[in-house]
Image: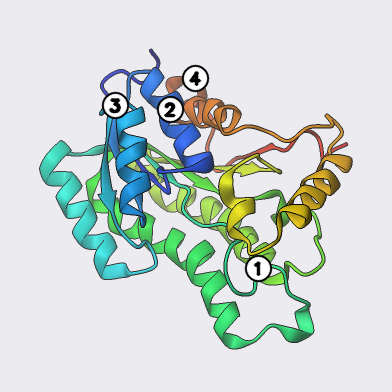
Amino acid sequence: MKLTGKIAVITGGNSGIGFGIAQQMAAEGARGIIIGRNRKTLKDASKSLAGAFLPVQCDVTQIDSLETMFNNVKEQFGGIDVLVVNAGGGIGPGTVQPFAEVDEQSYDAMTDLNLKSTFFTVQKALPHLKDGASVILVSSIAAHKAFPGMSVYSAAKAGVRTLARTLSAELMGRGIRVNVLSPGTIDTPVFDKMGFTDTEVTNMKSGFKDIIPMRRTGTPAEMGGVAVFLASKDSSFVVGEEIVADGGVVNL
């Protein structure tokens, strides 16, 4: 029970990687808040977590909503021990699009979801983070490996990784550690939200597996295990670092 007594806030905690992180943290004794935009999946996720994490509906791309949400978290739980900034991903307009065809609208949508929201989630949480808190930013192997058609997403996720370094230096005086989890291909519902046919999704998953040395996709629970490590005292001397959990794609 590495996180007993810890209060954690997990954005995008209602499905996929975020839910896997919430499951593993709850198993280690943490409690707190999961944040998402879909009310139904939030309630279902909270129920599956046996109430360890309460559901809060919030659009992380709306700065005013973030500020209100964190004020409410403060009233309910006091200070925050662990902040997991997971909301984001390769979904919606501009996700997979040739560079020459990217327009301003799709560019803004991708960067708002994957970089701007991360920046302001941490900023609005900052007054409520306890000294010595752990902040975990979720990036992607797209920050390291080129995937044609994903220029905006990749650039945004690279910005998340770099942001962790700057925040680590700025928050060192409070003992707040900022680290990054960069997943590879994880088997989550995101594939079903990308607007492709079932056949296209199957072919896409198969194509990703072909480039993974371990010959399989990862699981949300495995990402949760990494997050628990970064949130716990086991990583007390780890700061400004990135853990790439991708089955060997980047390094092998």
What is the distance, in whole Å, between disc 4 and disc 1 at their CAs? 36 Å
Which mark is in front, 4 or 3?
A: 3
Which mark is in front, 1 or 3?
A: 1
Give me the residue at 53% from left, 79% from top. Answer: 108
Which comes before the other along the chain, label 1 or label 3? 3
Question: Label 1, on which residue?
Answer: 95
Give me the residue at 45% from left, 59% from top. Answer: 118
Label 2 crowding class (10 Å Cα cut-off): few <14, some 14-19, many 20+?
many
Which one is nearer the viewer's eye here, 45 or 3? 45
The image position of residue 119, as x and y in percent, is: 43, 62
Residue type highlighted by circle 2: Gln
Which comes before the other along the chain, label 2 or label 3? 3
Which comes before the other along the chain, label 1 or label 2? 2
Residue type highlighted by circle 4: Asp
| Left/right of residue 221 with respect to residue 158 in the rendered view | left
Question: Label 2, on which residue?
Answer: 23
Q: Is residue 132 visible?
A: no
The image position of residue 46, as x and y in percent, is: 31, 35
Residue type highlighted by circle 1: Thr
> Which circle marks residue 234 in the picture?
4
